[in-house]
């Protein structure tokens, strides 16, 4: 169970690397790709937190977050195409 | 430490490794299309590893079997929706006029759009001739 701290730290480092691309990225789609990756990583992080705290209800939170992130990314893609 | 816990922990480790690789590809690749290519694939695989591994790990630690059911639901949802959002996003990026990297050699979507525009032009010319 101690190993879970290491995994949480590794995922946090990956999120920080994606955050670098979000801040630096020269064009708007670069930043949106970074947001997409960050939401995917955050979903896995929420499932790991459910195990960390031992509460199964937190997995449902991760599922709802995944649904909302999917809708948000689709809306941004429509905006890029000029259809929104 | 039984077999389920060990398998789940190994899956979580592999998943975090792929998460790290996807973030690394996001930084190192030269343009938005290559970035999307590397990071989406490995982030999807990493999500499957982390989420299903967490379910196995929890069952091995003595939690109820419902953990594995819920984690499989989340993993299936991510497996289905992540490629769709990546495709829509990169199509929007192409339509908004982001240029390809200098070293790119294949542009099938651009060729397809050109062929379609040319066909529409020919059809219009024939219509004018009649």
Image (spheres, rainbow, N blue to C red):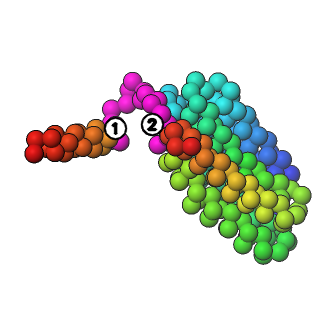
Q: Quadrant of the C terminus of chain B?
A: top left
Q: Label 1 belongs to which residue?
A: B110
Which residue appears at 68% of the width and 42% of the height? Answer: A38
Mark 2 vs 1: CB contact within 8 A = yes
The residue carrying pointer 2 sits among few (fewer than 14), some (14 to 19) or many (20 or more) residues within 10 Å by Cα, namely some
Residue B40 in the figure: left or right of residue B122: right
Q: Where does residue A71 sit, x and y in percent of width and height?
A: 64, 52
Magenta region includes residue B108: yes
Find numbered disc 1 in the image and state the secondary structure of the residue it sits on: helix
Residue A63 vertical placement versus B42 (above, below): below
> Which residue, as the protein is rendered here, is positioned at the far bottom?
B65
Q: Nearer the viewer, residue B121 or B26?
A: B121
Give the position of the N terminus of chain B as an image quadrant: bottom right
Q: Which mark is residue A23?
A: none
Which residue is the site of mark 2? Answer: B94
Q: Residue at 49% across / 36% down in the picture?
A: B93
On the image, which quarter does residue B25 sit in?
top right
The residue lying toward the viewer, choosing from B117 and A33, is: B117
Instruction: Reply above or below: B63 against A65.
Output: below
- Please name the residue shown 78% across and 53% down the image: A46
Q: Which residues make up the magenta segment?
A: B91-111
Label 1 crowd bin: few (<14), some (14–19), many (20+), radius 10 Å: few
Q: Secondary structure at mark 2?
A: helix
Q: Is residue B24 visible?
A: no
Instruction: For mark 2, name the chain.
Output: B
């Amino acid at each position: 169970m101690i190993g879970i701290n290491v995994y949480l730290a590794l995922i946090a480092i990956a999120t920080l690397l994606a955050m670098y691309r979000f801040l630096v990225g020269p064009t708007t789609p670069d930043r949106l790709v970074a947001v997409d990756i960050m939401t995917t990583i955050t979903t896995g992080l929420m499932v790991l937190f459910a195990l960390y705290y031992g509460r199964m209800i937190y997995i449902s939170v991760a599922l709802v977050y995944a649904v909302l992130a999917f809708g948000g990314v689709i809306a941004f893609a429509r905006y890029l195409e000029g259809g929104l | 430490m039984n077999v389920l816990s060990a398998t789940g922990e190994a899956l979580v480790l592999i998943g975090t490794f792929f998460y790290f690789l996807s973030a690394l590809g996001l930084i190192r690749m030269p343009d938005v299309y290559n970035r999307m290519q590397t990071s989406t694939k490995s982030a999807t695989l990493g999500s499957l590893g982390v989420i299903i591994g967490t379910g196995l790990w929890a069952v091995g630690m003595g939690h109820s079997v419902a953990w594995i059911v819920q984690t499989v639901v989340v993993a299936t949802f991510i497996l289905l929706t992540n490629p769709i959002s990546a495709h829509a996003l990169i199509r929007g990026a192409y339509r908004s006029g982001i240029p390809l990297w200098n070293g790119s050699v294949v542009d099938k979507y651009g060729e397809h759009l050109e062929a379609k525009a040319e066909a529409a032009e020919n059809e219009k010319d024939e219509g004018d001739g009649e």
